[in-house]
Amino acid sequence: MEFIEPRRGARERARLEYGLSRGPRHFITEVRGFNLDLAFRRDAWYLLRTRLQQEWPGAQAWTCLEYSSRRGIHMHIMVRGAPTLTVDWLAHVVSLLPADEQGQRVTVDFQPVSDAEGIARYLTKQLRKPGYWDGMPRHFHPVSATHDWVPGWQAEADRNKGG
């Protein structure tokens, strides 16, 4: 059972790469000052996801909570199916989120994706590190995706590889 973590991270990278290959996509990062709150996805993502799906009913997304010594816990989001998504629309929706107990507000960075393989490698770098999953609370998932992100991705990916 040693090394299960890197395999899990590699599988997530493959799922992300496959999803990114299926159409135009946007890369979003949400940050709230320096925080260590693993509930950040709940606090910062659910309103944005709801608004995305109201505006673009076919929108699909993949998210990953990440830790860095500079930002603490922050969230990366890949969005597909929202062709007219703009930074102004995102900033407006994020401005609706309440500040945390310290008065810190969520901020957002937004950019189109030109290198899907590179961004998938970047977004899953921590997930592939040995021992990374050991630091997570039981039943905590640093990665999430809308149910329609890539339905049946594994079977199609295997077919494309000839496996």
Image (cartoon, helix red, strand yellow):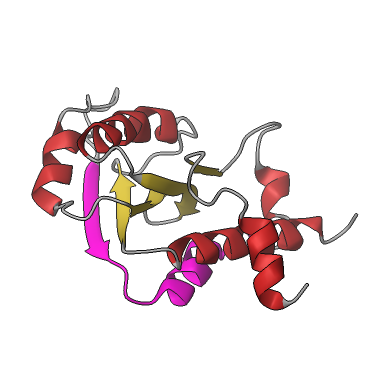
| Residue 61, position as x, y percentages in the image | 41, 47
Q: Nearer the viewer, residue 127 or 152?
A: 152
Magenta residue check for 127: yes
Residue at 28%, 26% (x, y): give it.
100
Residue at 29%, 37% (x, y): give it.
57
Q: Is residue 154 left or right of residue 97?
A: right
Magenta residue check for 104: no
Answer yes or no: is residue 74 visible: no
Q: Is residue 152 left or right of residue 68?
A: right
Residue occupying the far right of the picture:
1
| Residue 36, position as x, y percentages in the image | 45, 38
- Magenta range is 107-128
Q: In the rendered view, would you say 140 is above or below 34?
A: above
Quadrant in which residue 163 is drawn: bottom right
Residue at 29%, 43% (x, y): give it.
33
Number of numbered discs overlaid on the protein picture:
0
| Residue 148, position as x, y percentages in the image | 48, 43
Q: Nearer the viewer, residue 117 or 159?
A: 159
Residue at 9%, 48% (x, y): give it.
88
Q: In the rendered view, would you say 76 is above or below 138?
A: below
Q: Nearer the viewer, residue 154 or 10?
A: 154
Quadrant in which residue 14 is drawn: bottom right
Q: Is residue 159 left or right of residue 24?
A: right
Answer yes or no: is residue 142 visible: yes
| Residue 130, position as x, y percentages in the image | 73, 61
In the picture, the quarter occupied by the N terminus is bottom right
Q: In the rendered view, would you say 38 is above or below 119?
A: above
Q: Nearer the viewer, residue 25 or 153?
A: 153
